[in-house]
Amino acid sequence: MKIDRHNLRILQALQTNARISNLNLSEQIGLSESACLARVKRLTSERYIREFLAEINLDKVRHAEFYVNVALKRQDARTSENFRRIISDIPQIVSCVKMSGEFDYMLRFICPDAADFNRVSEQLLANEEAAISRMTSHLVIEKTKPFTGYPLELLFQD
């Protein structure tokens, strides 16, 4: 599937407002409603659009956010698989990325408070199957640039 200027504009519009009506989207893009809907369906079936989610405003609830760097004791596939399985069962870990460099993974924790983060992270460190050799945590003080979408016009350049 080729990402032409219409598809790019659809993706840009949907990543900032996934609840936009097809009528408003089609007017914004400059396509008929049926053509716009067909493109959205194709972008979804081709997995350019993975899912439609609601972003919850965490400022409305008590929370503490931490980014945590994790180094594993070993670099083999079984150790990584065990680690990923263990963290997938911890609801406070809302995302995980495998990294290059000094640390193997970066985790994002959303907890009700620092005490909960401390309890969960100590349990994770104590779990021998997780095989964590080192963990450093960073408390988010302020979000100075919240996520506002990907720079699609740069990512789809030829």
Image (spheres, helix red, strand yellow):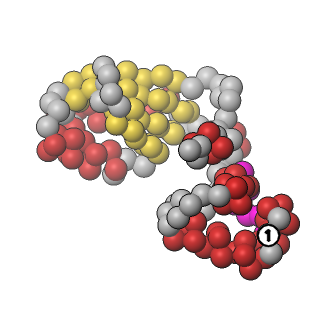
Q: Is residue 21 left or right of residue 65?
A: right
Residue 153 higher or lower than 74, as above or below = below
Q: Nearer the viewer, residue 40 or 90?
A: 40
Crowd rating for badge 1 (residues with CA inside 10 Å; few <14, some 14–19, many 20+): some
Residue 82 higher or lower than 72, as above or below = below
Residue in the picture at 46% in, 36% down: 108
Relative image position of residue 106 (x, y in whole percent): 39, 32
Residue 41 higher or lower than 104, as above or below = below
- Label 1 sits on residue: 31
Residue in the picture at 48% in, 22% down: 138
The main secondary structure of the magenta stretch is loop
Residue 19 among those drawn in magenta: yes
Residue in the picture at 33% in, 28% down: 100
Disc 1, SS: loop
What residue range appears in magenta? 16-21
Relative image position of residue 121 (x, y in whole percent): 35, 32
